[in-house]
Amino acid sequence: MNYLQAVQEITDVVPDFENEVKEIKIQNSYNIIRTFTGCIKNMIRQNDRNLLFKSLQKMDKIYTNGDVMLKNAIETTFIYSLDNCTAFCSEEYKKLIFSHISPTLQTTYSRQIYSHGI
């Protein structure tokens, strides 16, 4: 899957995403994932759990089926921003969010967090 296919996948879950993509001047894997991460962050803030959990599943599908650029974009954008996205959540809500992130992405998150600064 390339970034154009990823846009279609995301739009299936978040119909407004297509409008947000039109605002992106340079469309590539990193900017698409950065925009989708921003949407997920808003879902967390607004406590839109149904859409949030579908979006987290979609992020995993993109990671699993995506090309190298999408995988790198997810690792360096989405995974890296998880702490920031959940910083003001209650501990229970944070655990709930992480329970909807695939084991593969959780492993990537742990590897990134625990290797940071070494």
Image: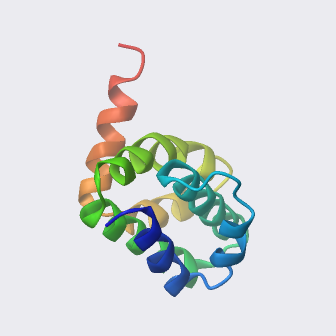
| Residue 70 appears left or right of 45 | left
Q: Position of residue 103 (x, y in %)?
A: 25, 59
Q: Residue furthest top?
A: 118
| Residue 70 appears left or right of 64 | right
Q: Position of residue 83 (x, y in %)?
A: 54, 44
| Residue 112 appears left or right of 50 | left
Query: Residue 64's quadrant in the figure?
Result: bottom left
What is the quadrant of the N terminus in the image? bottom left
Labels in figure, total = 0
Q: Residue at x 29, y 56 (%)?
A: 67
Q: Is residue 108 above or below residue 41?
A: above
Q: Is residue 114 above or below residue 30?
A: above
Q: Residue at x 30, y 44 (%)?
A: 108
Q: Residue at x 32, y 70 (%)?
A: 61
Q: Is residue 49 above or below residue 56?
A: below
Which color scheme is applied? rainbow
Q: Position of residue 7 (x, y in %)?
A: 50, 72
Nearer to me, 5 or 115: 5
Query: Residue 3's quadrant in the figure?
Result: bottom left
Q: Residue at x 40, y 23 (%)?
A: 116
What is the quadrant of the C terminus in the image? top left
Q: Residue furthest front?
A: 26
Nearer to me, 4 or 75: 4
Q: Position of residue 89 (x, y in %)?
A: 64, 56
